[in-house]
Structures are given as structure tokens and as C-alpha cells.
């Protein structure tokens, strides 16, 4: 949705095509921060206000046409955005989002997080889940595992602790 023009007639035609085509049951937007600062730091090149504006227009058009189209957000859990997840749930309600799904940056087979990070992540997920429940937003997702908590993985000794470079150019596993 960050590619929709914001002040042109083709803007509405793209939204109409999505809502009225009956091809889509759900549209999902990658949205990794509740604040402009975090969102634009993670989603390089995206403009926070533009994406918010386009989601609002899509939801408004969907609602005015009694469409059953679900609008969802995919939130990739990272050290620099997990603290914003509860705030994102409230923002999602305001802009017309029906569903939020969290995802990990890497699969359990590849990486794990420390026990302290796991505790912090699960606390934010719990708060966000409770808030979503109160607001009527579907909420689900994944959480990283600790080194010893995912016993069914073969070769778990080859897994490395997940860490993130501060320059946002890469993720080290």
C-alpha cells in the first residue's frame, strides 16, 4: 500500500479493484512499527503517513461497500520494534485493521533468543494480545524460542543466538 499514489484518481481505482474484484479474501500489509520513527527505520523507503492514509482509505471504501475483505498486518518481531506492538494494536483499530499476525525474522531451526529477550518479547506479546482481544482485533503469531526450549529441532547445537546489526543493513544469525 505504500506504492498507491495519494492524490490521484488512480488511487481510488486501485482500491476499488482490490475491494470489488472478489478475488481477495484478505489483504495483508507488512507494518513493523507503530511510530513513524520505527516504521521508517525498518521499512526503508516507505513513508509512514502515506501508508496509514492508504490503509484508512482502503478500510473506508471496504466498509462503505459492505465488503467482507479482511485487512491484516504482518508485524516482524525485532529488538527495535517489539516495544511498539501494544501501541500498534491500538493504531490498527483506529485505521480499520481486522487482524495482526506477528512473525519471526528467522526460523527456530536457525536462531534463538536469550532467556531475557524471550521474557521481554512474550510480555509485549501478552499485552498486545490482551489489547487486541479488548478491541476485537484477531491477533496471532510466532515468538522466538530460547536455546533449550525447542527440543524437537535436529542439530540444535548448530543454531546461533539471533542478533541484529544496528545499521539495519543486515541481520546476523
Image: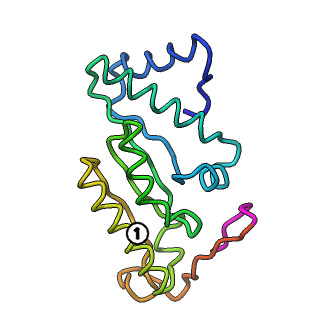
Image coords of residue 79 (percent x, y): 56, 70
Task: Name above or below for residue 88 compared with residue 147.
Answer: above
Picture quadrant of residue 126: bottom left
Which residue is at the front of the view, 101 or 47? 47
Image coords of residue 40 (percent x, y): 65, 49
Image coords of residue 78 (percent x, y): 55, 66
**In the drawing, does residue 43 fall left or right of residue 149?**
right
Q: Name the residue located 51 percent from the left edge and 85 percent from the top edge.
A: 114
Q: Quadrant of the N terminus?
A: top right
Image coords of residue 55 (percent x, y): 47, 33
Task: Name above or below for residue 25 compared with residue 131.
Answer: above
Q: Name the residue located 69 percent from the left edge and 48 percent from the top edge.
A: 44
Magenta residues: mostly which secondary structure?
loop
Q: Name the residue located 32 percent from the left edge and 29 percent from the top edge.
A: 69
Please provide the residue range marked out in magenta. Answer: 167-172
Total marks shown come to 1
Q: Name the residue located 41 percent from the left edge and 35 percent from the top edge.
A: 27
Task: Name above or below for residue 67 compared with residue 49.
Answer: above
The reply to whether the magenta stretch includes residue 166 is: no
Residue under numbered circle 1: 124
Amino acid at each position: 500500500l505504500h506504492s498507491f499514489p495519494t492524490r490521484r484518481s488512480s488511487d481510488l481505482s486501485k482500491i476499488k479493484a482490490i475491494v470489488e474484484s472478489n478475488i481477495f479474501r484478505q489483504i495483508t500489509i507488512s507494518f513493523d512499527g507503530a511510530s513513524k520513527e520505527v516504521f521508517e527505520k525498518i521499512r526503508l523507503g516507505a513513508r509512514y503517513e502515506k501508508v496509514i492514509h492508504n490503509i484508512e482509505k482502503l478500510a473506508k471504501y471496504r466498509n462503505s461497500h459492505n465488503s467482507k475483505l479482511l485487512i491484516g498486518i504482518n508485524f516482524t518481531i525485532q529488538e527495535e520494534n517489539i516495544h511498539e506492538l501494544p501501541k500498534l494494536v491500538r493504531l490498527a483499530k483506529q485505521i480499520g485493521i481486522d487482524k495482526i499476525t506477528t512473525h519471526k525474522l528467522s526460523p527456530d531451526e536457525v536462531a534463538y533468543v536469550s532467556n531475557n529477550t524471550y521474557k521481554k518479547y512474550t510480555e509485549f506479546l501478552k499485552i498486545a494480545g490482551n489489547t487486541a482481544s479488548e478491541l476485537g482485533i484477531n491477533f496471532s503469531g510466532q515468538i522466538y524460542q530460547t536455546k533449550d526450549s525447542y527440543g524437537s529441532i535436529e542439530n540444535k547445537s548448530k543454531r546461533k543466538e539471533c542478533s541484529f546489526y544496528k545499521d539495519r543493513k543486515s541481520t546476523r544469525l
